[in-house]
Image (spheres, rainbow, N blue to C red):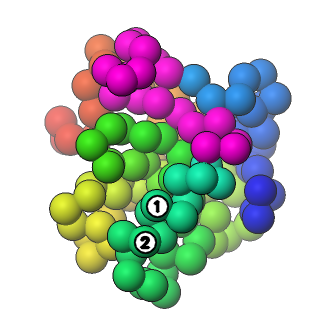
């Protein structure tokens, strides 16, 4: 990666290189990208950001389908890295922080019943 994995992400990627929660693709609401897929998806997300300066430290981590992603913000090295909601119709003008770490994201996702927990708040 072009950025160091924080402790949570390192533990996850040492265990598995990506995952789908609840459903398999193409029906998965939570498709955690592999390291290779993060690289590939980064160019797709960058095309949508129209060169927005603040997006330089944002990388797609979870594909929520329909061109929606959860991004990891690696601006502050060492982590934990916050995760952001990148809704395709408002990105990059409106990006909202979901949680402060991948660990918190995964815990909340696994108890969500396959719903986007950050949209219910």
Q: Percent from the top left, x then y, of residue 54?
A: 48, 81
Q: Is residue 87 left or right of residue 79?
A: left
Secondary structure under tag 1 reads helix
Residue 9 magenta-highlighted: no
Give whichever of 117, 2 is nearer the camera.
2
Residue 101 shows in the view: no
Residue 82 against residue 114 in the figure, above or below: below
Q: Which residue is mark 2?
A: 47
Residue 19, above or below 51: above
Residue 95 in the image: state x and y as whole percent.
Answer: 32, 65
Question: Residue 69 at x, y = what percent?
Answer: 39, 49
From the image, which quarter does the N terminus lie in? bottom right
Quarter of the image with the C terminus is top left
Q: Residue at x 76, y 64 (%)?
A: 2
List x then y, in percent, for residue 15.
77, 22
Q: Is residue 85 left or right of residue 37?
A: left
How far apart marks 2 and 1 lie (CA) works out to 5 Å
Numbered label tally: 2
SS of the residue at dot 2?
Answer: helix
Residue 3 is marked as: none
Residue pictured at 57% horizontal, 23% vertical: 19
Tell whether position 36 is magenta: yes
- Find out whether the residues at labels 2 and 1 contact each other: C-beta distance under 8 Å: yes
- Return the mark for residue 44: 1
State the image quarter where residue 102 is shown: top right
Q: Bounds of the magenta span?
A: 20-37
Q: Residues within 10 Å of mark 1 (few under 14, many from 20)?
A: few
Is residue 37 at least partly visible in the picture?
yes
């Amino acid at each position: 990666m072009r950025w160091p994995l924080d402790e949570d992400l390192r533990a996850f990627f040492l265990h598995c290189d990506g995952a789908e929660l609840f459903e398999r693709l193409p029906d998965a609401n939570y498709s955690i990208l592999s390291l290779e897929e993060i690289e590939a998806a980064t160019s797709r997300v960058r095309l949508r950001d129209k060169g927005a300066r603040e997006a330089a430290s944002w990388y797609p981590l979870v594909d929520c389908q329909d061109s929606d992603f959860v991004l990891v913000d690696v601006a502050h090295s060492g982590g934990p890295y916050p995760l952001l909601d990148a809704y395709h119709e408002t990105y990059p003008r409106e990006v909202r922080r979901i949680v402060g770490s991948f660990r918190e994201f995964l815990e909340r996702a696994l108890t969500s019943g396959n719903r986007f927990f950050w949209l219910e708040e």
